[in-house]
Image (cartoon, grey):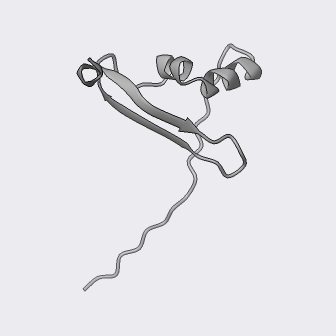
Amino acid sequence: MSERTAKHDTTVVERKLKSSPARVFAACKDPDAYGRWNYPGDDWVMIDYENDFRLGGREKKTFGPREIQN
């Protein structure tokens, strides 16, 4: 039997925005604002959003089809 291994690492996504860092940070804290520019497609909505901005914190977001919101 072959041995399996997994390597976990950090992914960094960089994006250049025309807004100030303060405005971008405020949008990331607001689930409605964040959901307007970070979603998988027009037929999807953000169901849940959590963001821990502390050092070592994490972001969690859950999306689903728009029809489940009705």
Which residue is depicted at the point 69% across and 26% down? 25
Q: At which x and y percent is residue 27?
A: 63, 21
Image quadrant in which you'd find residue 54: top right
Rendered position, 47 above or below 6:
above
Check the picture and name the quadrant holding the C terminus: top left
In this picture, residue 44 sits left or right of residue 60: left
Rendered position, 10 above or below 24:
below
- Residue 37 visible somewhere in the drawing: yes
Extreme residue toward the bottom, this view: 1
Which residue is depicted at the point 63% across and 27% down? 29
Which residue is depicted at the point 59% across and 46% down? 58
In this picture, residue 35 sits left or right of residue 16: left
Rendered position, 20 above or below 65:
above
In this picture, residue 49 sits left or right of residue 44: right
Q: At which x and y percent is residue 16?
A: 65, 23
Image quadrant in which you'd find residue 18: top right
Check the picture and name the quadrant holding the N terminus: bottom left
Q: At which x and y percent is residue 68?
A: 25, 25
